[in-house]
Image (cartoon, helix red, strand yellow):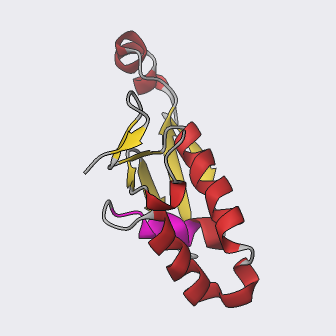
């Protein structure tokens, strides 16, 4: 990706839930295949993989609203956690790239076919 990650606007494309402790659990469906969804998933106790986020990841997840850029999320992260989150942009970029790779988010203002930011 040649676009600057800090200029991108992440958007959630998967469900999550907030736990009693305030942390987020992302719910990744185990199957997408229509056959599996119809015949296997109803027999499962839990149709989702659960990905538990820590305090920082949960905070970032809650900031992803389709309006804030990664840079703005980083500023809020630094504002909220101060030096505990430093180096903020290194940590944030690794986290954002990871959740994008696992298809938990996509970018609202990025066209991967043209590899550029769109308006």
Q: Is residue 92 above or below residue 11?
A: below
Report whether residue 92 is seen: yes
- Indicate the quadrant where residue 90 lies: bottom right
Q: Position of residue 32 (x, y in %)?
A: 42, 22
Q: Is residue 117 above or below residue 63?
A: above
Which region is colored magenta?
Answer: 58-65
Residue situated in front as seen by the camera: 39 or 116:
116
* Residue at horizontal 51 percent and vertical 61 percent from the top: 6
Residue situated in front as seen by the camera: 33 or 1:
1
Task: Decide whether the magenta segment is chiefly helix, strand or loop.
Answer: helix
* Residue at horizontal 39 percent and vertical 51 percent from the top: 12
| Left or right of 94, for residue 14 | left
Instruction: Judge whether residue 26 is colored magenta.
Output: no
* Residue at horizontal 39 percent and vertical 14 percent from the top: 39
Q: How many marks?
A: 0
Residue situated furthest top in the rendering: 35
| Left or right of 81, for residue 66 | left
Q: Is residue 21 above or below residue 105?
A: below
Report whether residue 19 is seen: no
Which of the image's four quarters has the N terminus?
top right
Q: Position of residue 77 (x, y in %)?
A: 57, 78
| Left or right of 2, for residue 17 | left
Q: Position of residue 99 (x, y in %)?
A: 56, 47
| Left or right of 33, for residue 52 | right
- Indicate the quadrant where residue 25 lies: bottom right
* Residue at horizontal 67 percent and vertical 89 percent from the top: 82
């Amino acid at each position: 990706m040649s676009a600057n990650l800090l200029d991108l606007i992440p958007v959630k494309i998967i469900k999550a839930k907030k736990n009693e402790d305030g942390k987020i659990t992302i719910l990744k469906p185990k199957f997408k295949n229509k056959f599996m969804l119809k015949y296997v998933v109803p027999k499962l106790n839990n149709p989702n993989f659960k990905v538990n986020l820590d305090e920082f990841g949960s905070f970032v997840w809650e900031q992803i609203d389709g309006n804030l850029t990664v840079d703005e999320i980083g500023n809020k992260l630094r504002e909220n956690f101060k030096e505990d989150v430093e180096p903020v942009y290194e940590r944030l970029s690794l986290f954002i790239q990871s959740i994008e790779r696992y298809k938990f988010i996509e970018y609202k203002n990025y066209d991967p076919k043209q590899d550029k930011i769109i308006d």
